[in-house]
Image (cartoon, rainbow, N blue to C red):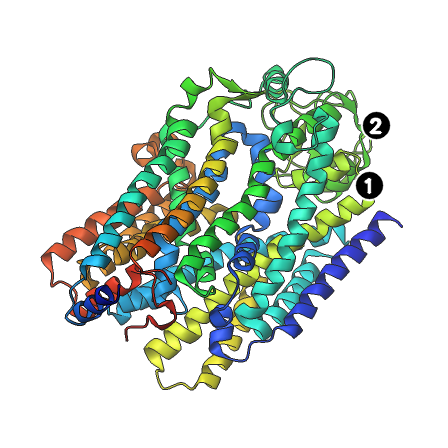
Amino acid sequence: MENEQQGQETHAEDGETSAVENAYWHENVRLLVVLMSIWFIASFGCGILLRDWLDQFSIAGYPLGFWFAQQGSIYVFMALILFYVLRMRKIERKYDLDD
Amino acid sequence: MSTQTLIYLFVGLSFALYIGIAIWSRAGSTKEFYVAGGGVNPVVNGMATAADWMSAASFISMAGLIAFLGYDASVYLMGWTGGYVLLALLLAPYLRKFGQFTVPDFIGTRYYSKAARVVAVICLIFISFTYIAGQMRGVGIVFSRFLDVSIFWGVIIGMGIVFIYAVLGGMKGITYTQVAQYCVLIFAYMVPAFFLSFMITGNPIPQIGLGSEVNDGSGLYVLQKLDLVLTDLGFAPYTDGSKSMIDVFCITLALMVGTAGLPHVIVRFFTVPKASDARKSAFWALLFIAILYTTAPAVGAFARLNFVDTVNQTAYEDAPAWFGNWEGNDLIAWVDKNQDGVMQYSAGTAFEGTPVFTEERGASGERLLSNVPTPENTNEVYVDRDIMVLANPEIGNLPGWVIALVAAGGLAAALSTAAGLLLVISSSVSHDLLKSTFRPDISEKGELLAARLAASAAIVVAGYLGIYPPGWVAEVVAFAFGLAASSLFPAIFMGIFTKSMNREGAISGMVSGLFFTFAYIFYFKLANPAANVAENWLLGISPEGIGVVGMVLNFVVAIAVSKMTASPPVEVRKLVDSIRVPRGAASAHVH
């Protein structure tokens, strides 16, 4: 760990990104792509584009598409942020870059 | 105790609480004034962000919009919550790691340019003033209806309260008053919602109630009954929309991206200790917001059912007291087209324009209007959407203390947002314009004084806009979100996620996004409102959703220009490297 940190500092001085930071950033971006896709599917997908089709199903007294537009998408948003908070804590510990 | 006494008591107590907090949490340094010292607990900051974000529009207007727009109002529900995903995942942790005081700070430093900073300040001031005028108006409405004070004095009292805690306490005072205001407003929103849901469906949880059967023995679900009742009266079914799919899509996206680009929201994430706290804080903020936002659709649907039930085919003489109260405040009107003394409510407008009352009373005792009744439909009732939440406790016959609570809650929502907006205006003037651009030699004390003076001046302007609202205020809320989406969001996003974006690209992107969006909204909302119909819109996108096109334009122009000009200096690449990793948030300044 100590070596990694030193490498990071020397690299940072000449304007290059260290290997650890690079790997960390790529893992972060990969995670972001997955989560942003779910964000898009839950709101724009289920709540808008696929709504008419989804409305043939229902969840209690809600037509399913309508439920996604006025309730479900908001629950998904909360779950996404919570997952990101927990997952990033793990990733940051793995690369020893946590604050 | 009479309802009126209770209202004075609740509003008075809540004001005393805010002032008490302000005196306890005075700001002693610019860091305390701008970012509350940077040591706010993420849960506390989440709660303050929720109060900051939920304005008079969320508290007073949103359920009313949902009640009258049905599915179409989903754009607000998704748009005003989905932006927090963008904030938590794409912006907040990195901006916190950057660790400065304002949004123009980041843009000015990342794009190594005073011009970029000044462009950001201009966007910020325009966005914030558009927004704040609406808050002061909300304060005025609540005062005039519930406290029998004229709108003029209502706004003056509201200004006085905000002055005390925003000018004395800065961000520190605002943070802790916003926590108190969140508690007041969420309690005030939920109590009537529980009552209404229980009354209509037998289940007190509104989110479940909206999906349950109506307890009138019909066996119908709430939404089915609502669709049935409304189509009977000639309205479109509640669960169908009338907006086109592309427009719904673009408005939702513009509101989401706009939310993530609003300076008074972003700046709240500068107040937590660490980058990881910014993520946590965004989660808590959305959780606290979602409590109200998932309740609003239920409140809207119940209110619409109740309203049709109590008003349609009721003789004016038998109308409940709240009907006359709101008629007295010009927000409800009735024209007896068929002279039968009974109110007929159906689709269509009852008369042309907004009500202009004469001093006379009609045969049934109703206030007469000088508007021309519309002969082509049978609707006789005019109702302003904004009264739904405020009138709900009265429509549902709830006890007096609930009405008093709602009055205090509406004021809390308007005041908390107004204070947050005033703070970003004042810090952009004292910090970005004076300290960082025109008067770099200003002392810490001088900067703090300038911040307080700028906050005071902004309060006076906001109050003026609240008392004498220019006709365009309601028309230009689209500006705030559209401009934030088309100017600030892309610049911040590219500043974090690409190292090659340079000064020339960012400035030309911001300017073209801003100019395009501004011109489109200005043309359809102000210059030529008659042309504001779907056939004339670009790609069928309304002015509310055009920020999306402005945002795309911003990205395209910025990338094209940056490819043709010199890449950013090494220090800036290092800065980007440093904001991408969370470690060392407290000392991340590369200056």
Q: Residue at x 59, y 42 (%)?
A: B292
- Which residue, as the protein is rendered here, is positioned at the far right? B1
For image coordinates 30% across by 52% down, the residue present is: B490
In which chain is the residue bearing label 2? B
Residue that numbered label 1 is attached to: B399
Q: Residue B481: image x %, image y %?
A: 42, 49
Same chain for mark 1 and mark 2? The answer is yes
Q: Position of residue B287 (x, y in %)?
A: 53, 46
User: Would you say B174 lies left or right of B258 here?
Assistant: right
Comparing B298 with A92, the one in front is A92
The residue under the point 52% across, 65% down is B40
Callout 1: 10 Å neighbours few (<14), some, many (20+)?
few
Which of the two residues, B287 or B104, is positioned nearer the viewer here? B287
Q: Earlier in the sequence, mark 1 or mark 2?
A: 2
Q: Is residue B54 above or below residue B100?
A: above
Disc 2 crowd rating (10 Å Cα; few below 14, some 14-19, many 20+) is few
What amino acid is found at the position of numbered circle 2 in the picture?
Asp
Can you give x and y, in whole percent of width and height, for residue B538 in the image? 30, 36
Q: Please tell me whether mark 2 sits on a helix, a strand or a loop.
A: helix
Write down the quadrant of residue B148 in the picture: bottom right
Marks 1,2: beta carbons within 8 A? no
Q: Is residue B488 visible from the viewing direction of this image?
A: no
Looking at the image, residue B81 lies above or below residue B127: above
Amino acid, disc 1: Pro
Q: At x 22% / y 53%, what residue is drawn?
A: A23
Task: Please determine whether, in this image, residue B48 is positioned above or below residue B337.
Answer: below
Q: Report helix, strand or loop for mark 1.
A: loop
**Which quadrant of the figure contains the C terminus of chain B?**
bottom left
Q: CA distance from mark 1 to mark 2?
A: 20 Å
Q: Which residue is mark 2?
A: B318
Left or right: where B238 falls relative to B307: left
Across and down, in percent, residue A75 comes to 49, 37
